[in-house]
């Protein structure tokens, strides 16, 4: 019988996010600098076998029941479907967060390998703005990727949109229409201080109330009962679909957080905003047994803080940015 992975505040952690690479074929302004970042050397990346071993320990020892692959851009890691197949054998819910650009090629293969849910990031439906935001001319391909995911049978397909004041906050209604017409759930996300360029400031954050007002203007919604998921979900009053808002800054969901993270270079993090990490790669490569690895993970979670301190005097920005941590 698996023991739960509990911290000192009684929060049980069942959701493991695995970054499979820190590399990316986009350079989103709110995430990465134009010139990219210094990539982790290949031999420092966990192998598929190492990733699968950590995941198995988390499932067997701690009852982790949800795994999400992320990055960087997970689809730039060669042979991703092979890893999906290995992880699908653990029997957990298995999901992917991607910029979508490779989905026209990969969606069917990933689904066949056992992936069931996919989130595609898209922050503008206007080609020129999309190109400015991602520093790549890729909107058509991303929209094809969303269609390919739906056609391959992923359920649900969600679209992540980071809302930034004066950048794309005039597109909330367009995204509502887009989600409803394509049968996908759009999740609006508040901009977090995890960009590599340090452009974040609170004036750029469009808080949940404002996003919700924009959604309601486009189409009235009613709240759906809250779960441990970070998004507050709303159902359209006319019954055709739903929308989510991730109020990571203005109304943080830390008190119900059930997530832990493994970076592409094998560092275990108990919080997106953690300033310390546990070196699981060193354990894996020094012959540590499952007990030792499970104990290190357990200790990290036991010491998890109550929540991030964004906009408070105590807030310390993590050394690594979103694409290096795994969003
Ligand atoms: N490359 C994939 C993608 O873009 O979906 C996966 C990695 S990306 C880091 C994961 C998620 O983090 C994306 O939905 C992205 O929009 C979001 N993200 C990146 N930087 C962010 C920031 N500073 N604030 C809020 N969300 C951010
Ligand atoms: Fe790449 Fe995703 Fe970051 Fe954009 S948000 S630069 S697609 S990792």
Image (cartoon, rainbow, N blue to C red):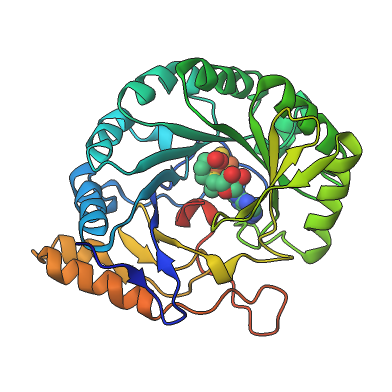
User: Which image quarter: residue 266?
Assistant: bottom left
Q: Is residue 167 left or right of residue 260?
A: right
User: Which image quarter: residue 195?
Assistant: bottom right
Residue occupying the far right of the picture: 217
Q: Nearer the viewer, residue 103 or 286?
A: 103
Q: Is residue 186 above or below residue 252?
A: above
Q: Nearer the viewer, residue 315 or 136?
A: 315
Image point (63%, 28%), residue name: 184
x, y (%) of residue 255? Answer: 57, 71
Image point (45%, 52%), residue name: 38
User: Quadrant where the N terminus lies?
Assistant: bottom left
x, y (%) of residue 302? Answer: 36, 79
Q: Is residue 79 left or right of residue 230?
A: left
Q: Nearer the viewer, residue 27 or 87?
A: 87
Q: Is residue 137 left or right of residue 60?
A: right
x, y (%) of residue 242? Answer: 69, 36
Q: Is residue 9 visible?
A: yes
Image point (33%, 21%), residue name: 112
Q: Is residue 201 above or below residue 188?
A: below
Q: Nearer the viewer, residue 240 or 156?
A: 240
Q: Is residue 35 visible?
A: no
């Amino acid at each position: 019988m698996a023991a739960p992975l509990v911290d000192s505040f009684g929060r049980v952690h069942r959701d493991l996010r695995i970054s499979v690479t820190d590399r990316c074929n986009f350079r989103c302004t709110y995430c990465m600098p134009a010139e990219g970042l210094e990539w982790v050397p290949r031999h420092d990346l966990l192998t598929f076998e190492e990733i699968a071993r950590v995941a198995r320990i988390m499932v067997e020892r701690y009852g982790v029941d949800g795994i999400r692959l992320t990055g960087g851009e997970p689809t730039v890691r060669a042979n991703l479907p092979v890893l999906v197949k290995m992880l699908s054998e653990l029997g957990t819910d298995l999901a992917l967060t991607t910029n979508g650009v490779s989905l026209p090629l990969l969606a069917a293969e990933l689904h066949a390998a056992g992936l069931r849910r996919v989130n595609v990031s898209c922050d503008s439906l206007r080609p020129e703005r999309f190109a400015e935001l991602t520093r790549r001319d890729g909107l058509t391909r991303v929209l094809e990727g969303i269609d390919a995911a739906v056609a391959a049978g992923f359920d649900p397909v969600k679209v992540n949109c980071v809302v930034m004041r004066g950048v794309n906050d005039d597109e909330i209604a367009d995204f509502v229409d887009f989600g409803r017409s394509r049968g996908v759930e759009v999740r609006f996300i508040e901009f977090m201080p995890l960009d590599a360029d340090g452009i974040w400031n609170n004036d750029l954050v469009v808080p949940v109330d404002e996003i919700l007002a924009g959604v309601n203007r486009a189409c009235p919604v009613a709240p759906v009962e809250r779960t441990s998921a970070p998004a507050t979900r709303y159902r359209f009053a006319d019954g055709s679909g739903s929308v989510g808002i991730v109020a990571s800054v203005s109304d943080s969901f830390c008190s119900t957080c059930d997530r832990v993270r493994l970076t592409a270079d094998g560092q275990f993090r108990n919080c997106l905003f953690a300033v310390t990490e546990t070196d699981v790669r060193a354990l894996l490569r020094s012959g540590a047994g499952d007990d030792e690895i499970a104990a290190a993970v357990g200790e990290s979670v036991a010491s998890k803080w109550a929540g991030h301190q964004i906009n408070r005097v105590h807030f310390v920005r993590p050394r690594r940015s979103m694409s290096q941590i795994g969003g």
